[in-house]
Image (tube, grey):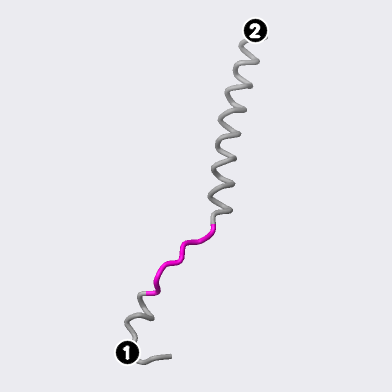
Amino acid sequence: MNTSALITMILAQGTVISITAYFFYKVLTMPPKDEPDSYSENDDEPR
């Protein structure tokens, strides 16, 4: 394998791994959305 081919392959794999890790980190650190609790909204009795 040529040196230039090896460098290109390592750069391409490094770029893909970096982008994947960035978005994986963003998903794991995203705060949860406040969603309404439909079960408690359907209760007839107040708590």
Q: CA distance from mark 1 to mark 2?
A: 74 Å
Q: On screen, 14 above or below 42?
A: above
Residue placed furthest toward the top: 2
Q: Earlier in the sequence, mark 1 or mark 2?
A: 2
- Residue for point 62% across, 28% down: 14
Location of residue 36 in the rendering, given as x and y in whole percent from the top left corner: 39, 71
User: Relative to 17, does residue 9 appear above or below in the rendering?
Assistant: above
| Amino acid tagged 1 | Asp
How packed is label 1: few (under 14 Cα within 10 Å), some, or many (20 or more)?
A: few
Residue extending farthest to the right is 3
* Residue bearing the label numbered 1: 44
Predominant secondary structure in magenta? loop
Q: Quadrant of residue 9?
A: top right
Q: Nearer the viewer, mark 1 or mark 2?
A: 1
Start-end of magenta stretch: 31-37
Q: Residues within 10 Å of mark 2 (few under 14, many from 20)?
A: few
Question: Looking at the rendered structure, which numbered label has been put on residue 2?
Answer: 2
Quadrant in the picture for the C terminus: bottom left
In the rendered view, would you say 40 is above or below 34?
Answer: below
Q: Position of residue 19 (x, y in %)?
A: 56, 35
Membership of 32 in magenta stretch:
yes
Within the magenta stretch, is there residue 1? no
Q: Foreground residue, 11 or 5?
A: 11
Instruction: Identify residue type, mark 2.
Output: Asn
Residue name at image x 54 percent, y 59 percent: 31
* Secondary element type, mark 2: loop
- For image coordinates 57% across by 23% down, the residue present is 12
